[in-house]
Image: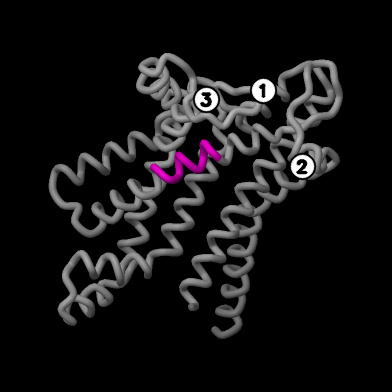
Amino acid sequence: MMRTRRLWNHAVLTACYAAAGIVVLPLVLIVGHLLGKGAAGLSLEFFTHMPKPVGELGGGMANAIVGTLIIVGIAGAVAIPIGVAAGVYLAEYGRGKFAALVRYTTDVLSGIPSIVVGVAAYGLVVVPMGRFSALAGSVALAILMLPTIIRSTEEMVRLVPRSYREAALALGAPRWKTVQQVVLPAARAGIVTASMLAVARAAGETAPLLFTALGNRFWSLSLDEPMATLPVFIYDYARAPYDDWNAQAWTGALVLVLLVTIISALLRLTVRRVRTG
């Protein structure tokens, strides 16, 4: 009997490790491929110089890197507070038809292709403004972020033990303060992870930006004008018939992955320090 249990234990553990390896393997292959193709183009010039005209070698994507940070940053600043608030509402107060409608709408929105969101943002923002702009791109990316943040926040808040709430309420804390000072700190790590997943997804979207921010080969920090972004540059450079542009597309893809990784790591470290502190 003991031998059989040990064999089953080893078999199940092996299966768990194999499943974890299968999950991690695609990421390792993608990052390894990007390193192999794009690492040679990493240089200070790539981060500090503007794109060169067609036919000239070299140049960089400084405007696209800054533009991506601006557009994704504005989208996150809009979507994360709204998404977290909606997720907390659904988990703590979400009862009745209105909450069911919010959940249903969120689930439908999560399945809409990103290009459809880009077309919607084009009609809602670009057409009234009369031009493409960074603000329109931020609106499109914020819409894409919302479903992930809302549903993940709801699940993270639901995972907080009910005893935490009961203890705070027994001490005389009102419901809103219990949520603010007990529930949210307990679910902080999960909420940050969900927010970073949403940011990572939005940072790599190209189709919505083609209909909204459009792109710009020049330096522009104006939010009501077209702005360069890494995904659009990668798309344009990858399909161009120039070897130098193709190589820069691989480098741009690697930089985009590194940016998302660094931002996620910094936020996770910040949350961990706050928790331990």
Q: Is 75 within the magenta? A: yes
Residue 144 locus on image (x, y percent) = 43, 36
Q: Which residue is drawn at 64% across and 60% down?
A: 18
Residue 20 in which image quadrant:
bottom right
- Is 98 left, or right, of 202 in this rendering? left
Residue 248 locus on image (x, y percent) = 77, 31
Q: Most prominent secondary structure in the magenta stretch?
A: helix
Q: Which amino acid does label 1 sit on?
A: Arg
Look at mark 2 in the image and give the residue it sits on.
Answer: 33
Residue 239 locus on image (x, y percent) = 71, 20
Residue 216 in which image quadrant:
top right
Q: Which amino acid does label 2 sit on?
A: His
Of callouts 3 and 2, the N-terminal one: 2
- Is 221 left, or right, of 50 in this rendering? left
Look at mark 1 in the image and give the residue it sits on.
Answer: 217
Q: Which residue is drawn at 40% across and 34% down?
A: 111
Q: What residue type is labelled 3?
A: Ala
| Front residue of 266 and 192 | 266
Look at mark 3 in the image and give the residue it sits on.
Answer: 213
